[in-house]
Amino acid sequence: MGWAIDDTPVKIWTPDQNIPTEIVGIFALPCSRIIHAHNAQFERLISWYVLCVDQELPEPPLEAFYCTAAQARARALPGNLGNLGQCLNLSIQKNRRGTELIKLLSVPQEDGEFNYDPDLLQEIYDYCATDVDTERLSAKITPPLTDAEFADYIVNERINDTGLMVDIQFAQAATEYAADERAEICAKLSELTDGEISSPQQYARLKSLMEPFMEENEEIKGAMTLTEFDRKEGKQKSRLAFGKPARRQLLDLEETKPGTLPPHIIEIIELTDEAGKSSVHKFRNMVERADPETGRVHGAYIFSGAGQTGRFSSVGLQVHNFPRKCAENPAQVKADVLEGYELDNVMATLSSMLRPSIIAPEGKTFVCGDYSAIEARVLPWLSKSEGGEDILDIFYNCDLDPDLPDLYTLEAAALFSIPPEKITNDQRSIGKVMVLALGYGGGYRAFQSMARGYNVKVTDDNAEGIKKKWRSNNEWAVDYWKRLEFSAVAAARDPGTEHGAGMVNYCKPGPETPLYCQLPSGRMLSYPDARVDLVESKYGTNWELSAIKAQWTPKQDEKEWPRIKIYGGLLAENITQAVAADILRHAMQMLAFPVHLFDDDGLPLVGHTHDECLLEVAEHSAEKVEKCLREIMLDLPEWAADLPMAVETWTGQRYRK
């Protein structure tokens, strides 16, 4: 154990020594935030379950542990200690040899024995001490978590400790099913390509397979041309690809123009698409990460893990990345898999069982509340514009009277120039994609990307027309993007000044400080090392705002940490998702502590994926809890009291969307 008190030199303790009296005293204190560590969850758990047991120490309470990795993520900096030190250009850097040393010393060797080489041991002690110095230095030069942020971190850790129960029996069977199906897909690919391709991961070879057809048909080349907005360079970039979007476009082309590609190529595309589903890995993760005694997977949620916004992300179980589509009859699918029956469309069926594989224990049930269309509500609310108020009125009226046409229907009606009552379900789906995809300045590619998730198919030309029509009908949004960008650039150019846009304010306290955005809640979004450069573009000379991007890492030949170009649409996305995160955090705080409202046997909040709260309660109290959950989630914080909000709830034994 490497440790230090305040600014004193780092010390190393090993189990052959007496435990230091300072450690004994610190562990016995009831103080909050007294033990600082990077990724404190690890130090907390190994202290509780190893150190305290072996050395007969009192267990420090959860609130005693303060996470400096969470502090870094909350400031839009890398959570990984090595990356953080490099990003901040610290005078002390993490020793990158640590991973190798752990393999050499903490993993049994070929003979089953551990390595006790004294030189290697001294090297890992030095490595541990350097970690403490790096953690301490990085924490000193970034703002600490506020009281509210620390409280949110603690609630998330309680949820991680409770864990999500998974259906291990089904997950094991599904893993085998998926592995068998994948093996068959690989064999079929090899057969169709005369042994040239034997894995769906061989993208380069698969792309080469398409080259003759691209040369013959420009439409095929167009379908395989992926055009994306490169936020790092701030412009659209095109490249040939054979990823999921390209494969979807090729299959769409074949559907509209049968015979464009030979049947065996279509089959190869479909097989690659099928094998690309992540069911194998996710079910295997469930099995490997579940506690063998309780069947629960712990540590699934990361506090402030989603970049600039402060939203939560997930790790291991990756609940944030589960497919939306769920099996209509999970019990029947499980029975078929356990019996070994042949499934139709194996990978798609298994994929639809990922969410339902999270289950409530016997005698319990899930109660879930999900904020309805929260981002579509928050953005116009933040704009404080007349057009935004009109959008909020639509939500307010629909919340009171569900029979009224909703925003998606009205947007579709405006697009197709027909009365709302004549809008079909397919047309409403287009309206929904418009609202969800275009609110942050996205172009027709953003529309197409989201459209695929909702099974909406339009041509690129039509998507471009839809984008233009939406912007014409929602000038308030276009104007707000411009106001946000103007305010952020002005604040970055003139440190010490404050510039508002709607309900947020931008400021850069000093030349060396980050650019901050103050949200209605008072929480600050951080844009590290923000700067403004005068650049030439096809639109003339403009001020361009950029900042460090925590999720990116520099290439080997790059010295500077990668930067992201910041524009109005991105700023709108950041503040909208950040406010949504603040509303969810507020609900989680209220749900985490009044345990007496639900059960007398523990914390009911076990999950919070995206904009939802997942409770696990006794079956007999489900109806009471569902009503109470809706009331609590709709009890918005004072700063958001005038934001119209709705919550959709459900109960059941298996998790679903």
Image (cartoon, helix red, strand yellow):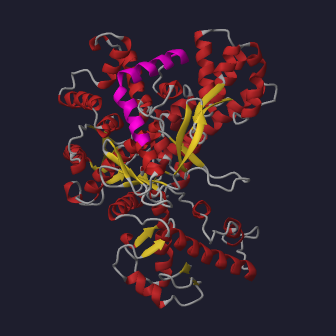
Residue 198 visible in this rendered orientation of the protein: no
- Quarter of the view holding residue 172: top right
Q: Is residue 304 above or below residue 110?
A: above
The magenta stretch spans residue 500: no
- Quarter of the view holding residue 411: top left
Q: At which x and y percent is residue 55?
A: 49, 84
Q: At which x and y percent is residue 619?
A: 26, 47
Residue sitting at x 56%, y 46%: 533
Task: Give the quarter of the figure containing the N terminus.
Answer: bottom right
Q: Is residue 326 left or right of residue 197?
A: left
What span is in magenta?
458-486
Task: Give the quarter of the figure containing the C terminus.
Answer: top left
- Quarter of the view holding residue 390: top left
Q: Is residue 55 above or below residue 256?
A: below
Q: At which x and y percent is residue 628?
A: 20, 47
Majority secondary structure in the magenta region: helix
Q: At which x and y percent is residue 507?
A: 40, 53
Q: Is residue 305 left or right of residue 288?
A: left
The magenta stretch spans residue 472: yes
Q: Nearer the viewer, residue 301 or 106?
A: 301
